[in-house]
Image (cartoon, rainbow, N blue to C red):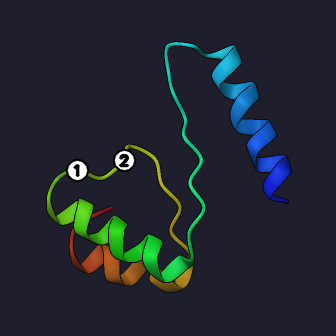
Amino acid sequence: MEELCLQMVKEFNRNYPEYQVIMQKMDWATYYNKLFVAGIGKRSPDIFVVHTDSLLRFKKANLL
């Protein structure tokens, strides 16, 4: 799965050089904590993944 994701990122970056996607691997707890703190600091990415069981936390903090 990880190799497939890396392949997709490389292909995207090749096809759209005006954008740069960087793949980072981390566990979900770390990801959500970093994303939440980035959102509070107004530094969150334009696009990110949030599982349905974490949506309420982000919604309550007005980070969606």
Determine crowd level at label 2: few under 14, some 14-19, many 20+ residues with C-alpha closer than 10 A. Answer: few
Q: Badge 1: few (under 14), some or many (20 or more) residues near its Cα, within 10 Å? A: few
Answer left or right for 63 relative to 25: left
Residue 57 vertical position relative to residue 2 in the rendered view, above or below: below
Q: Are marks 2 and 1 in contact (CB under 8 Å)?
A: no
How far across and how far down the image is residue 64, in percent?
Answer: 33, 61
Asked whether 64 or 24 is in front, the reply is: 24
Residue 45's disc number: 2
Taking the spot 50% from the left edge, 22% from the top edge, the residue there is: 19
Residue 40 sits in quarter: bottom left
Q: Position of residue 45 (x, y in %)?
A: 36, 47
- Residue found at x 51% / y 27%: 20
Q: Amino acid at mark 2?
A: Pro
Specify the amino acid type for callout 1: Arg
Identify the residue position indicated by label 1 in the image. 43
Percent x, y of residue 30: 44, 77
Task: State which quadrant residue 1 falls in.
Answer: bottom right
| Residue 18 place in picture, x, y as percent | 49, 13
The image quarter containing residue 10 is top right
Q: Residue at x 31, y 74 (%)?
A: 59
Question: What is the count of numbered marks?
Answer: 2
Report whether 31 appears left or right of 35. right
User: Residue at the location (35% across, 76% down)?
Assistant: 33
> Is label 1 in a helix, a strand or a loop?
loop
Q: Which mark is residue 22?
A: none
Quick check: 16 above or below 38?
Answer: above
